[in-house]
Image: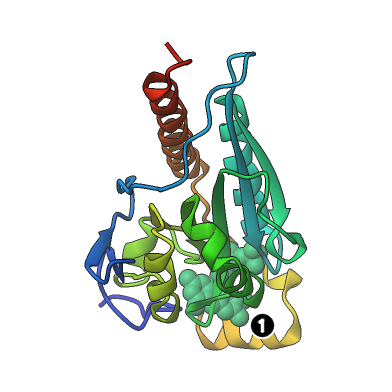
Amino acid sequence: MLAATPYRSVESGTAGVVQGRAGAVRAVVRDGIAGCAHAEAAPVPAPDGRSAVRTLIAYASRYGSTREIAEAIGEVLDKRGVAADVRPAAEVAKLEGYDAVVLGSALYGGGWLDDAVEFLESFQEELARRSVWLFSSGPTEAGDPVAALGGWRFPEELAPLAGAIGARDTALFAGRIDPDQLSMQDWLINRSMRGAGGDFRDFAQIRTWAANVAHALSDEAGDAVSSSPTGT
Ligand SMILES: Cc1cc2nc3c(=O)[nH]c(=O)nc-3n(C[C@H](O)[C@H](O)[C@H](O)COP(=O)(O)O)c2cc1C
């Protein structure tokens, strides 16, 4: 018999489906990069050969695990020539100066932390004009995190917003739980959900995802050069 899965999501499925800006239902690729046209002109590469695309990686994290995922994504982008700032979502006052945004949150009770939800809501218009990738981190089990949740979809209440901003992807990564770190309330919830302790994050998977993001952003910068009269 299969063991009960902690933190099972309310819906099953392997790919999120969100409502697009034009009202059309659009599949959000879970492990890949779904194409999406953005109205704002993509920036051209900087003279030093690095992409001039500046990316913000914002995160909401209660115990640091999602912060470390965000930092790992930032390192990959940086190494691939895409400038990246990694910051807590709650501390971001404006998106000016950023061409692209990666936003991630830990999952609690099936949903995102308030800081990430507030970020998504308050910057909705600015995000819709930028390239945006979303990720969630949560399942504390070995193996495929989507399977660990018995099928997973991006939090239902946020899916329309993700669609409205044209998010390129809504990835799910496994998480980490250290029972000794938890507040009494979280510890009790975790115990009642039979949540396992341990670090289940797959940094190889996270880095591959980040490399895909970097690749997409570099492509955009390249497209801008080849379509620009001065970029030949
Ligand atoms: C009280 C509690 C509730 C949780 N709820 C969920 C959940 O609904 N879905 C899930 O996948 N993981 C859930 N988790 C696991 C966390 O998302 C995971 O530990 C994550 O890595 C924590 O990230 P953070 O350290 O950045 O806060 C829960 C953990 C705790 C302690």
Q: How far from the left and from the top, in percent, is residue 10?
A: 35, 83
Q: Is residue 139 visible?
A: yes
Position of the N terminus, as image quadrant, is: bottom left
Position of the C terminus, as image quadrant, is: top left
**Which image quadrant for residue 153?**
bottom left
Query: Foreground: 68 or 23?
Result: 23
Query: Foreground: 53 or 139?
Result: 53
Q: How is the image coloured?
A: rainbow
Q: How far from the left and from the top, in percent, is residue 203?
A: 52, 43
Seen at 41% across and 48% down, the residue is 39
**Which image quadrant for residue 46?**
top right
Relative height, residue 62 to residue 203 (above, below): below
Q: Quadrant of ligand 1?
A: bottom right
Instruction: Find out if the beta carbon at label 1 lies less than 8 Å from the nearest ligand 1 atom.
Output: yes
Query: Foreground: 99 or 196?
Result: 99
Seen at 64% across and 55% down, the residue is 58
Relative height, residue 158 to residue 193 (above, below): above
**Which image quadrant for residue 9?**
bottom left
Relative height, residue 5 to residue 221 (above, below): below
Amino acid type at circle 1 is: Asp
Q: How far from the left and from the top, in percent, is residue 94?
A: 71, 58
Relative height, residue 79 to residue 42 (above, below): above
Q: Is residue 27 left or right of residue 156?
A: left
Seen at 43% across and 23% down, the residue is 222
Q: Is residue 194 left or right of residue 58?
A: left
Count residues near mark 1 (Cα–Cα under 10 Å), then give few for <14, some for 14-19, many for 20+. few
Query: Foreground: 127 or 63?
Result: 127
Q: How far from the left and from the top, in percent, is residue 214?
A: 48, 34
Q: Is residue 177 visible?
A: no
| Residue marked by disc 1 | 186
